[in-house]
Image (cartoon, rainbow, N blue to C red):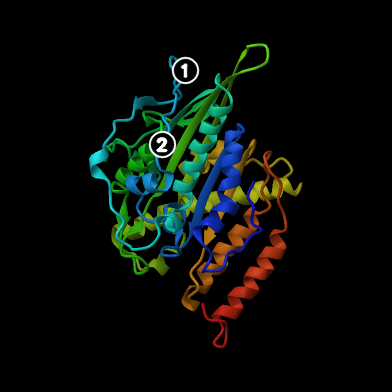
Amino acid sequence: MVDANVSHPPYAGQDQVYAHVGKPIVGNTLDGYNGCVFAYGQTGSGKTFTMLGYAPSTSDIRARKGSLASVASMENSTPLDGAVEPFESDDGDDVVDKTGLDPNELQGIIPRACMDLFDGLRAKRAKDSDFTYRVEVSYYEIYNEKVFDLIRPQRNTDLRIRNSPNSGPFIEGLTWKMVSREEDVARVIRKGMQERHTAATKFNDRSSRSHAILTFNIVQLSMDDSDNAFQMRSKLNLVDLAGSERTGAAGAEGDEFHDGVKINQSLTVLGRVIDRLADLSQNKGGGLSIPYRDSNLTWVLSDSIGGNSQTSMVATISPHSINFDEMRQTISRAARAGGGPGAAAEGGGWQQLHERARARIREEASPGGKKV
């Protein structure tokens, strides 16, 4: 479910945010539950920085982790949906950080989750010689309700979402890469970011016009006391949503205006899904259906938003008074999300959070209010 009980101040570090919204999700994924973390907010409010930090560099991850243990992969295991390819190493394209800041402090949710995921799998392997695992990753964007592969970009071909009676929705033809270490994932992200649809708005000169989804499929294989094989599968979705601001507020025109309409449409559906899940958790839903299929975004994430899964929504806001309406809308959505159901975790208190957040916005936006 969605935990909307924590409000971080502007000076909160990346490690603090990750500890609340990312680390518990990764832990549950290692235990066999599906998980999802997504960042929601207007353009320029810090969604991408929260999810990624700066552009991920394989050299930065090496500096933090030191020497990396090789990862044992399962041979002759059943492939997951989509074509799975081995990852080709490309050590010559590392990016050197030039910010002068400690890369460890700037790492966002995605690189931290990636490191915790592999650390957890390696720890299991160290404790049990019979334990083995495989990790596959995909990276794609949803732009104008069309799905594009960011690992193997084909701009003129949008991929179709199909439904499997056994595993639920999947993207037909999506590329999956087998990854054995953190650096492999970092390269996928860096190359994929270069392919994302962007456009200038008055809030951000390179605003992402698409929803970017990084998905991990994790397969864990172990033996029980009777030497019977036990296989556990789980999925982790890490999502950087497009800006949630109203189309007119972003100063968009022409094609960018059309993009904004589509973005708002998918985010509106996401909001309706959250509302329905919140109603169901409070026994207000009756026999209401959840409109997952009204948007490709919610359809493809349906197995990670509700049901036997755990989800964290990171709501990012700008403290400037001119963004008051957008702040209010974002916080209202986050507070509403706090009532969503989930089999993996339990939360609550969204009404209290909403009131505290509204009071804080009024204080900071008033002429004599606290400066941020």
Residue drawn 71% across the image and 62% down it: 351
Residue 59, horizontal then vertical, whole percent? 33, 46
Give the residue type that dot 1 points to. Thr
Residue hosting label 1: 78
Single out the mark in the foreground, 1 or 2.
Answer: 2
Residue 344, horizontal then vertical, whole percent? 67, 39
Residue drawn 54% across the image and 87% down it: 367
Toward which corner of the image does residue 246 lie, by quadrant?
Answer: bottom left
Q: How many marks?
A: 2
Which class describes the residues within 10 Å of circle 2: few (<14), some (14-19), or many (20+)?
Answer: few
Looking at this view, is 304 or 125 the one in front?
Answer: 125
Residue 291 visible in the displayed image: no
Toward which corner of the image does residue 213 lie, by quadrant?
Answer: top left
Q: Residue furthest right?
A: 283
Residue 88, horizontal then vertical, whole percent? 29, 30
Q: Residue furthest left?
A: 92
Residue drawn 62% across the image and 33% down it: 31
Residue 288 visible in the displayed image: yes
> Which label belongs to residue 68?
2
Give the answer, above or below, for where 330 lies relative to 36.
Answer: below
What element does badge 2 sit on? loop
Residue 276, horizontal then vertical, whole percent? 65, 48
> Which label belongs to residue 94?
none
Q: Residue furthest front?
A: 67
Give the residue type that dot 2 points to. Leu
Tags 1 and 2 touching, CB below 8 Å: no
What element does badge 1 sit on? loop
Q: Earlier in the sequence, mark 1 or mark 2?
A: 2
